[in-house]
């Protein structure tokens, strides 16, 4: 089953970006892990990242139109984009919200999410493991 793993702004900077918070591994490392995990689970993972909100909206619309499950790290858009939240509201297949860091231990503005209300579950603070856990859950739901 096609499963979209969607990543928002600045996540292309993984490995260089605030490594004390986000670790030293790169987005390419995360993609390889998600694709490999998907293969093990029988999921056809399409892994994407964008710094452009409109592109993220179009990917979410694609997921809505095809009833694709979504693993979403909307990064900073999580906290302020009503448009991303409204796109998430249109999804019919499971949506799992993921954050590498534990946003609840960080600044107050990271505690609110426009995604969570539409997500089946939220994983924060487990680093790359959060993505593999989300994919495992998607596969279990489909089994
Ligand atoms: C993040 C947390 C967000 O608050 C932040 O804006 C990000 C990454 C995470 O994965 O921990 O860019 O979503």
Image: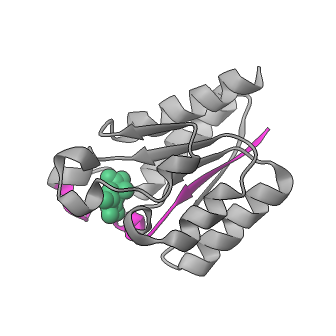
Residue drawn at the location 53% of the way across and 34% of the way down: 134
> Which of the image's four quarters has the N terminus?
top right
Q: What residue is rendered at 43% in x and 57% in y?
A: 27
Q: In which quarter of the image is residue 63?
A: bottom right
- The percent position of residue 70, horizontal first and vertical second, equals 64, 48
Residue 90 vs residue 128: left or right? right
Residue 110 percent across, percent down from the top left: 28, 58
Can the viewer see residue 93? yes
Snapshot colouring: one colour
Residue in the foreground of this view, choosing between 9 and 13:
9
Counting from the top left corner in percent of width and height, residue 126 is at 33, 35
Point 26% across, 52% down: residue: 22
Whether residue 76 is visible, yes or no, is no
What is the magenta range? 1-19
Does 91 sit above or below residue 138? Answer: below
Q: In this view, does 81 lie to the left or right of 119?
A: left
Quarter of the picture holding the C terminus: top right
- Residue 100, given in percent of the width and then of the height, sits at 34, 47
Is 88 magenta? The answer is no
**Is residue 106 left or right of 112 when viewed as pictured?**
left
Residue closest to the eye, 127 or 107: 107
- Ligand 1 lies in quarter: bottom left
């Amino acid at each position: 089953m096609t499963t979209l793993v969607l990543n928002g702004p600045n996540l292309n900077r993984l490995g260089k970006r605030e490594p004390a918070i986000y670790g030293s591994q790169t987005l390419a490392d995360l993609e390889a892990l998600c694709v490999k995990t998907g293969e093990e689970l029988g999921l056809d993972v399409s892994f994407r990242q964008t710094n452009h909100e409109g592109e993220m909206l179009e990917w979410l619309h694609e997921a809505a139109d095809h009833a694709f499950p979504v693993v979403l790290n909307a990064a900073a858009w999580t906290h302020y984009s009503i448009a991303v939240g409204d796109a998430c509201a249109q999804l019919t297949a499971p949506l799992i919200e993921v954050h590498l860091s534990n946003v609840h231990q960080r600044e107050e503005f990271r505690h609110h999410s426009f995604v969570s209300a539409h997500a089946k579950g939220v994983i924060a603070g487990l680093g790359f493991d959060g993505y593999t856990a989300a994919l495992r859950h998607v596969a279990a739901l489909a089994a």
